[in-house]
Image (spheres, coloured by chain):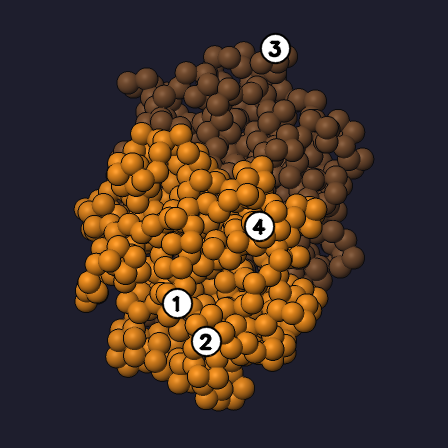
Chain colours: A brown, B orange
Amino acid sequence: MTDAIAYLDPRSGATYPLDVPRWCGDDGAPLMLTPMPGIGRDAIRQEARSLWRYAAALPFLPEAPITMGEGCTPLVPRVFAGATALLKCEWLMPTGSFKDRGAAVMLSLLRAQGIGHVLEDSSGNGGAAIATYAAAGGMRAKILVPATTSPAKTVQSRAAGAEIELTPGSRQDCADEALRQGQARRDGIFYASHNWHPFFLQGTKTLAYELWEDLGFRAPDNIIVPCGAGSNVLGCGIGFSELLRAGGIDRLPRIFAAQPANCAPIARAFLGEAPAAPLPTMAEGTAIAEPIRLRECLGVLEQTEGGAVMLTEAEIAAAALDLARGGIYAEPTSAQAAAAFAKLLEAGTIRAGETSVVVLTGTGLKATPRFAELMGVAL
Amino acid sequence: MTDAIAYLDPRSGATYPLDVPRWCGDDGAPLMLTPMPGIGRDAIRQEARSLWRYAAALPFLPEAPITMGEGCTPLVPRVFAGATALLKCEWLMPTGSFKDRGAAVMLSLLRAQGIGHVLEDSSGNGGAAIATYAAAGGMRAKILVPATTSPAKTVQSRAAGAEIELTPGSRQDCADEALRQGQARRDGIFYASHNWHPFFLQGTKTLAYELWEDLGFRAPDNIIVPCGAGSNVLGCGIGFSELLRAGGIDRLPRIFAAQPANCAPIARAFLGEAPAAPLPTMAEGTAIAEPIRLRECLGVLEQTEGGAVMLTEAEIAAAALDLARGGIYAEPTSAQAAAAFAKLLEAGTIRAGETSVVVLTGTGLKATPRFAELMGVAL
């Protein structure tokens, strides 16, 4: 373990030693890690066909990573809105979403620090990834979900043996209850939230290293990412900053956050629009009304001279069907990144000749009822 | 195109030129291709992170393969029934199943031969793969499914823009209707059946090359495969035979076919048991009552000194949950290969110290209702 790396509260500057497990500051603030030096191409473990190729970039190396081949996802060129986008198919992961990057790294590091029982709140891709990687690592997992969650949404986590606790009230009430239980550390359970724990971002940052290698050790010009709590925005921000620091690239790619207009706190803040009450959206994975690292997400968009795009439900639906008609079966949450690519092109913010990566985060197989609805098929 | 390669009826010895598209012999017999020389490791295209690494092993090279990163799936070691199995996670494919190997290769080759409109019959993984790769290749697809098929099963194919035709009667009636339409070639449509066309097996044979490379250019001792129509049994048979011919390996791995006891025509024939009327099984993907290449499948099991295993519904269910509890979320059809691994170990047919690959063919995300039922969760 590198002694210099510590937990960092980026707002107060407070640091905490890395080897004592924690998921927030003493005052409850969300944490990042202190900046790391990054790695060059010689440090890539050529024999690993997974994100563990970039293990040398992690804050420390667990002896036995929990791995099921996550990462090394396809980068597929597709003409969309008249220009070529490179679709990064992040749903080709063990649990069907990009969250596996974060879950594999976070739980591997936590297990190496002695954690054996984890708490999470999510009925979506995050919960499935935590439940599944906990199972793969021989750890216990408890997942809190709102009592109103459709039972179909928790089957994957239940199959992995996770304890599912139904909480009364809204999704926010559920998150609040998870925070309470996490703070209490009842029965030694550790709050390994995909939204809170900085190790999760150490997993999503491997996307930056992977894109860099995919492109022959160059950064793309633009990366367009579906954005809810912002773990891909932040992961790319951290990863490409490390690559810049290590001399692997000479400028940062522009990072763009795609959000549903119905729930777009980060995009609204970036674009200078007044906050608005969230409305339901088919881009469920990005329906995060109060992202805990909103300020840090804005920082990445500003620092990289990227931006934010808000998509209507009709634009998201059209993009999901367009992608599917070309053989790319990604969930609507993902498709908004493709819709944003089209809007950024149209606005002249990005151009057709540039290298633009569109990150598709989740599989369409988790959105069967939604696709049926979009096509007018009764289930 | 290598002139020497031709379509071959392995029973009569009749051959047909490869450059005239066809899917059966003049007498309606299923076809293979004449044996090919295979490739060595120098012929692997190192820059491709997909099955197109092994493109030099195909009967001819299409100028523009239809590809979305299929292949290069993870090989994950897991202790199961007290011994280590190497789980080949073939569901980490664009449509969620191993059928993408066959669909990508078959449709790429057919498109290069001028085919633009394909016919298929399958409401399962095969249909989804054909529909999706046709969409990816700008080809039209028509998929026949029994009228009784749950609408949820065809959402993925519909989203890819395929025409879905409901046929009256049983699954066999549907296959018969597809044969009729395929023979008629009405409107120039071509029967690109994943069960019939020998190019499909040229795709599944890449699994053999990939396992060989995964294992440091060695063959495993044993490969255990869920078996319905047998495209993985035959693909592995073809691929490893080519590797033997090319000098890449010095002996064939033993290939074992796992079938549900409720529908096990190949296993029954291999084990010398009397045919039995098929019963429903949760291993839906392998519920093929009349596999058209039964004889050729038996040939592979015999030639490789492998075997066949029949699994009860209880064994399949237990294996599916066991895998899931270890983080491997594969559909029950796949799980029977893990169950077969345990039975082969117990019987002493294979041993703990050997290198045994268990092929997991489809994602658990397509089997949500089944997993819910196994766990007693009401949806």
Question: First in sequence: mark 2 or mark 4?
Answer: 2
Pointer 4: residues within 10 angstroms few (<14), some, or many (20+)? many
SS for dot 2:
loop
Please state which amino acid type lies under the numbered disc 3. Asp
Examine the rendering and report whether any part of residue A87 can be seen. Answer: no
Where is mark 4, residue-wise? Answer: B243
Real-space Cα separation, disc 2 to disc 1, in angstroms: 14 Å
Question: First in sequence: mark 2 or mark 1?
Answer: 2
Name the residue located 42 percent from the left edge and 46 percent from the top edge: B254
The picture quadrant where one finds residue B147 is bottom left
Q: Are marks 2 and 4 in contact (CB under 8 Å)?
A: no
Question: First in sequence: mark 4 or mark 1?
Answer: 4
Where is mark 2, residue-wise? Answer: B12
Please state which amino acid type lies under the numbered disc 2. Ser
Residues behind callouts 4 and 1 on a single chain: yes
SS for dot 4:
helix
Where is mark 1, residue-wise? Answer: B293
Question: Residue A3 bears which disc, if any?
Answer: 3
Real-space Cα separation, disc 2 to disc 4, in angstroms: 26 Å
Please state which amino acid type lies under the numbered disc 1. Arg
Real-space Cα separation, disc 4 to disc 1, in angstroms: 22 Å
Residues behind callouts 2 and 1 on a single chain: yes
Left or right relative to B5: residue A222 = right
